Structures are given as C-alpha cells and as structure tokens.
Amino acid sequence: MRLDTLSALNAERAARRPALIVTDPEDGDQRLVRAAEIAADPLAALLRERLRSGRSGLGEGPDGRPVFVAVHAPPVRLVVVGAVHISQALVPLAAQLGLDLTVIDPRTAFASPERFPGVRLIAEWPDKALEEVGPLDAYTAVAALTHDPKIDDPALIAALRADCAYIGALGSRKTQARRVERLEQAGFDAAVIGRIHAPIGLDIGAVSPAEIALSILAQLVATLRKGCDAAAGR
Amino acid sequence: MLSTEDDILRAAEGWRREGRAVALATVIETWGSAPRPVGSHLVIDGDSRFLGSVSGGCVEGEVITEALDVIEDGRPRTLEFGVADETAWRAGLSCGGRIRVFVERID
C-alpha cells in the first residue's frame, strides 16, 4: 500500500467516515474509495453491499478478476441517556464489546463520577450534551433509559433525525404508546418511529439491571450485524 | 464494527513516517473455524517487530518471515495456511481452519 493511501485512509477513519480499500491480490493494484465516492465507482454495487454488511471479503471485479474489499467502518459509539442503575451495569459490558460509551444525564445526582468512574459523563440536557458528543451518525447507537420524556424525547428525536444505527427506549408498552403519540405530534411518521426498539432489549426475560443491560447490548449487536428488522424479530 | 484495526493502521503509518521499512499483512479469505476474521491486520517492520494478528499466533512467525522478503523485493504476495501437519515443519492452524493472507509493502 502506498503511504499516501494509508494516510488518506487513516484520515477518513479519524473523521468517522467509512472508507473501503480495493485490492487486486494478484498484482497488488490498490485504491481507496471514500463513502462519498462509492456511487461513481465501477464496483459500486459490490462496495455498497460490503459497506452495508460491514464485512471485508473477496469479490469479482468488472473484468472477472478477484478483488479484495476491506471495509473500514467507524467504531460504533453508544450514547446512553440516563445515568441510572442499568447504565452502571452497561459500562463493563460495553467496554468488552469495544463500544465507545458516553453517558448523558442532566441530573447531577445521577451523573456523578463516583457512580461512573472512568466513563465519559455529560451532566447536561441532551440537546447540549449531544453537541459535545459530536454529530450523531449511522455508526452511533442511542439508548434512552431515564423514563422521563423531558430527557429521553429530545435524544430520541435527535437519533431518529440522524438515522442512528440503533435506537432503543426503556419503558412499558403503555409508556411507549404515549411516546409514539408525542413523536407523531412532533411530525415523525410511523415507519420512522418504528425504528425505536421499545420496550428496549431482546426478550430474554431480563430482571436485574445487569440482565437488562445484556439484553440491550444483545439487541444492539443483532441490529448492527443482522439489521433492524431481524433484531426486532420481524 | 465493534473492535477495530484502527491502532494497527495508525501504527503502520507512524512506523513508515519514522523511516522504518514496513509491511502490512491482511487476512483476505478464511474457511472453517479461522481464529481471526477477514480484514484482520498484522503490521511488521524490517526488524521483525510486529503489532496485531492474522491468527491466534499459529502462523504469525511464518507471515513475519515472508513479510521480510516482501520488504526486500517490494512484490506483494498471498500466503495460504491450512490445518497443522505435525509431520511437516510447517506453520499451520490447529483449529482446523484455513486462511489466505495478503502481504504488501508500505511504500
């Protein structure tokens, strides 16, 4: 690989923009394709599919020669809204999965460093806190866990607008029904609201905070690896 | 997605900028129960220092040896490793899988 190609790739990664490296394994011919350049690429269909699945692998070039496509997608960030007991249980599990975790809660009694040692903690309302996190994107997951619409709703609205990879919200079916009404009033249609996993988490009969944390992360992984509908059991 | 090769590629760039000779090995194909997924990287410098992995440690030694040749002649090559054959003094994968590894020089 040429050093300038490697530098350009690392620059895309640092900016949280997906990129692909296309290599002919026979002669070593190689190029970088940035996400914005995929549509104009002769291998557009193959590259789009690889990027969607997040899996690197061999494919066939236009001339029938094998090409290796390496997918470099940004690391997934998890933004947890609510510095609650479940969030505390989420911290070590998310670290094991390599998720870049941020916890947001304007209630300073909850969002205290004593309760969340070593965690990126923002004791602000979501609108302000999300500015600090940086733009939400398709490689960000948002879990709203406060039970308080004043805190959860702005974060969910931002996540829906940014087309986040995974969106989940804690609360009973009744709570969710009221949430759907509020989001409809805010102008979202049913298909968009349907992207929110609520009640949050895979149905594994979770009871304790750690079990609920596990069910949330299991659903997050399923959504990232298999797609939204598969993770929802649809 | 979840765990990234970020640090390895940054190291590869950093090492090269320091003036070291550098080769990059990438898993391009796996069959069966291979220990590291396609896309995994191992970066090697001219003094055989390395970072990352392309297997569970089974074939890294041979990849590093080949990488030194790639650094020498600049010609990229694809290596294939299969099940360990204990009667042959060859690197192999004890897990029973097979992998192909592309090795190239950073120029």
Image (spheres, helix red, strand yellow):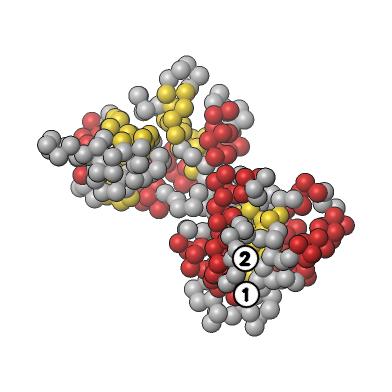
User: Measuring 76% from the left and 62% from the top, which residue is drawn there?
Assistant: A173
Q: Secondary structure at mark 1?
A: loop
Q: Is residue A42 left or right of residue A21?
A: right
* Residue A218 visible in the current orientation: yes
Q: Residue at x 26, y 48 (%)?
A: B57
| Residue that mark 1 sits on | A84
Disc 1 marks a residue whose amino acid type is Val
- Position of residue A147 measured from the top left corner of the image (x, y, whole percent): 72, 70
Q: Identify the residue at image location x=30%, y=51%.
A: B51
Q: x%, y% of residue B68?
A: 21, 39
Q: Which residue is mark 2?
A: A80
The residue most toward the right is A185
Indicate the chain on which mark 1 is placed.
A
Question: Residue B76: horizontal and vertical position, in percent?
Answer: 30, 30
Q: Secondary structure at mark 2?
A: strand
Q: Amino acid at mark 2?
A: Val
